[in-house]
Image (cartoon, helix red, strand yellow):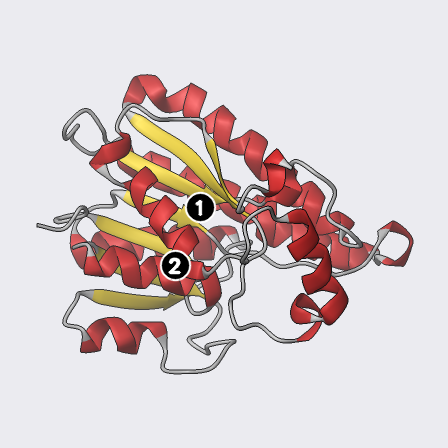
Amino acid sequence: MGRLDGKVALITGAASGIGRAIARRFAAEGAAILIADLSEAVREGGEPTRALIEAAGYPVRFIETDVSDEAQAQAAIDAAVAAFGKLDILVNNAAIGTDTPLTDTPLGDWNRVMAVNLTGPFLMARAAVRQMLTQEIVQGVRGRIVNITSQHGMVAAPNDIAYGVSKSGLVYMTRQIAVDYAKHHILCNAVAPGKILTGKTGRAVAPEILAYSESRTPMPRLGTPDDVASAALFLASDDASYVTGENLMVDGGWMAY
């Protein structure tokens, strides 16, 4: 028996990185998966997430989705229900950054980060909760939302003001949804990763960035996507049936330092 047997999970940004790891882990634990992303291209290389899950024999679908677009967000929720009959779990993982400080951030870049990282989770959560409210209560829960935030939602994101502000907003959104819908048996939590080595290239793995992250992380290693997937699995499972409004740090002790 998997921890998500019989569940249906929609995961945004699951073509690559953390979202990819979450989708594969949830599928292995018994969930039917809907991947919602801009494309199936894998940023770090390799077979598309859907292909890997299908090859392992698990039910999975893909829908091209820009989470910042209201119609596309609704279409993703509708696609999950059409394919699998319900929606038990939404994981808001899709996110972008600008890698720029305040004075170097164009308004267009700021607006796009807010659209993807904050408006996107709002649109996805709104559509998901509307669907979940129509569903039966099973073991005390109608549905679950897991937001992927960041330690940079609590402390400054060096040279990435738009990213940090958007993640801070998502931490707040998590609590607000949790409080508003607890009485309806809908749970909303978040996972806040520290420095995660996803295979992404560029500034994310520049020597000075890695050195900074290592200096801030008490544990003698940086994180992996599977570390985040394990935490998301806990919050999406019946093991967390009396947990809501929490922002679970998966950061090797970064925020305790």
Q: Residues within 10 Å of mark 2 (few under 14, many from 20)?
A: some
- Left or right side of 37 for 149: right
At label 1, the amino acid type is Met
Q: Is residue 199 visible to us here? A: yes
CB atoms of marks 1 and 2 within 8 Å:
no
Q: How many marks?
A: 2
Q: Residues within 10 Å of mark 1 (few under 14, many from 20)?
A: many
Q: Residue 213's spot in the image, x, y percent?
A: 67, 55
- Left or right side of 168 for 51: left
Q: Is residue 167 visible to us here? A: no
- Left or right side of 50 for 101: right
Tell me the residue that label 1 is attached to: 124
Residue at image point 36% right, 82% down: 47
Q: Residue 226's spot in the image, x, y percent?
A: 39, 59
In this orientation, which residue lies closer to the viewer: 17 or 205?
205
At label 2, the amino acid type is Asp
Tell me the residue that label 2 is attached to: 226
Q: CA distance from mark 1 to mark 2?
A: 24 Å
Q: Is residue 174 above or below residue 10?
A: above
Mark 1, secondary structure of its residue: helix
Q: Quadrant of residue 155?
A: top right
Q: Residue 7's spot in the image, x, y percent?
A: 18, 47
Q: Residue furthest top?
A: 183
Q: Residue furthest bottom?
A: 46
Residue at image point 82% right, 54% down: 107
Q: Residue furthest front?
A: 220
- Left or right side of 228 for 143: left
Mark 2, secondary structure of its residue: helix
Residue at image point 31% right, 46% down: 233
Q: Residue 89's spot in the image, x, y percent?
A: 30, 44
* Of the image marks 1 and 2, the number of the one nearer the N terminus: 1
Residue at image point 54% right, 65% down: 197
